Image (spheres, grey):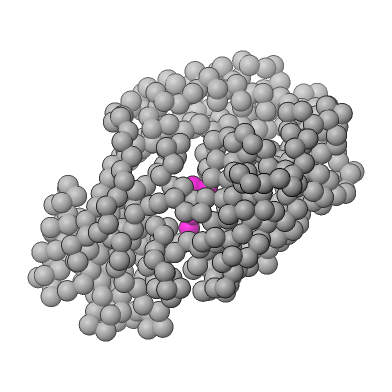
Amino acid sequence: MKAKEITSQISKSAEFLNLIKWDFGASFSNDYSVQVEKGIAKQLKASQKQVLTIRVWNKSNLVGITSTSDISESGIQKALNQASIASEFGNKNESTDFSPLAKEPIKVQEVRKRSPVGIKKLLKILREAELKLLDSHKSITSIPYNGLSESFYERIYANSDGAFRNYSKSQAALYLYARAEEKNKKPRSSGSVKLGYGVDDIDIKSCISEASTKTISHLNYSSIRTDKYLICFSPEAFLTMVNAFSSIFNARSIIDGVSLSNKDSIGQQISNEALDIYDDGLNEKNITSAPFDGEGTPTKKLCLINKGKLENFLHSESTARIFKTIPTGHAGLGSKVSVSPDWLVVKRSDQCTDLNNALNHSKYEGEYVYIEELNAIHAGVRASQGSFSLPFEGWLFNKGKKESIESATVAGDIQYLLKNIVNIEIQQEVTTSGISPHVWVNELSITGDA
């Protein structure tokens, strides 16, 4: 069913049921994915998905919500009726409404249309990639986690006030996670992920090379003594940390009392003045970009931290109304709407002077710990308290030499971390979750086995 047709069908069904105020979000996708194990197909999947989420407001302006995969006339009527019934149990303490920006123009990224390559070709490509990775080094014994997928989807938002918007897109992903073993040494693992609008856009050779190089480099490992160290976060690791504590910017978290910020935090210095952070969902490097959020609010570039000061919060319609501002395009769709960041861009402030420019991950020869990847985020982060204790993959550097760290955790407080940034390198790198340079932090606690 086309976007206009489903909107018309919902409008007619709502009129038939005498429902005056409603909105909906819909998602339609065709997904294909494969996994292999030593050349043998481990999992082959092809699926068609359709999800329709409808909200209905009653005469008391309370909202009810329901979801369905049945988009027939009877299915839509049933969903509308269920949402209407649910509205009688809506939250009386906090209201939700249409976004005032749901009719504003949106910017849809122009991307060349890709076509599905199909399961057979996906399997062939992944088998070849697995074989090349296994052949890249004698110590690599298996690729326990791997996958190649492509997805083609359409998103729709519309409401009874006349708002209507939709877009369609494609996305492909390859991940290779290798395991290496040598005599008298523990098995070591690492991997690589590459994204593209289609399978033909993915740099498969680079993914294989990166997974191999990272895995083999971890074979030369040793334990690390428990102490405080100068830390260099990889771009990916720093973005992981910022996302883990994104409740600092989240208006919904502030209202719920689970954020380190409060309503009066805008303008406060929360980090070294060298730090700038933007949420830039429409960045041309963001393959997963969406032109509008779950409430139909246009996506836009938003400055979160400017020269170390908290500049903006992320808002839905309801939180923006409470804060007496406008929605920012970061809402989900629900009776109690969630808020989350899109795609973070970290950079060094243009006017920054108070940094140690000698700290460069490709040149510095002093002792420091390089954190490549943070793990167990959900278990090791206490966002409402600001604390973290996370296992990581990384290296100990000293006098230009590096040695993989066998097993260790990094622990601390996000407020301390942000205020003790001692360098933000100029060169930014694109990752799967955003853009960031390498970021250096002074004296974080590392707990090792030595």
What is the quadrant of residue 232 in the picture? top right
Q: Position of residue 53 (x, y in %)?
A: 29, 61
Q: Position of residue 74 (x, y in %)?
A: 14, 62
What is the quadrant of residue 353 in the picture? top right
Q: Residue at x 38, y 36 (%)?
A: 171
Q: Residue at x 34, y 81 (%)?
A: 89
Q: How many marks?
A: 0
The prevailing secondary structure element of the residues shown in magenta is loop
In-front residue for pair 141/200: 200
Q: Position of residue 320 (x, y in %)?
A: 42, 69
In-front residue for pair 397/364: 364
- The answer to whether residue 286 shows anywhere in this view is yes
Describe residue 108's horizontal placement relative to residue 379 as left or right: left
Describe residue 185's horizontal placement relative to residue 158 as left or right: right
- The answer to whether residue 82 shows anywhere in this view is no
Describe residue 444's horizontal placement relative to residue 83 as left or right: right
User: The C terminus is located in which quarter?
Assistant: top right
Q: Residue at x 68, y 56 (%)?
A: 271
Asked whether residue 417 is drawn in magenta, I would say no
Asked whether residue 341 is drawn in magenta, I would say yes
Describe residue 223's horizontal placement relative to residue 196 as left or right: right
Bounds of the magenta segment:
340-344
Q: Residue at x 27, y 45 (%)?
A: 167
What is the quadrant of residue 201 in the picture? top left
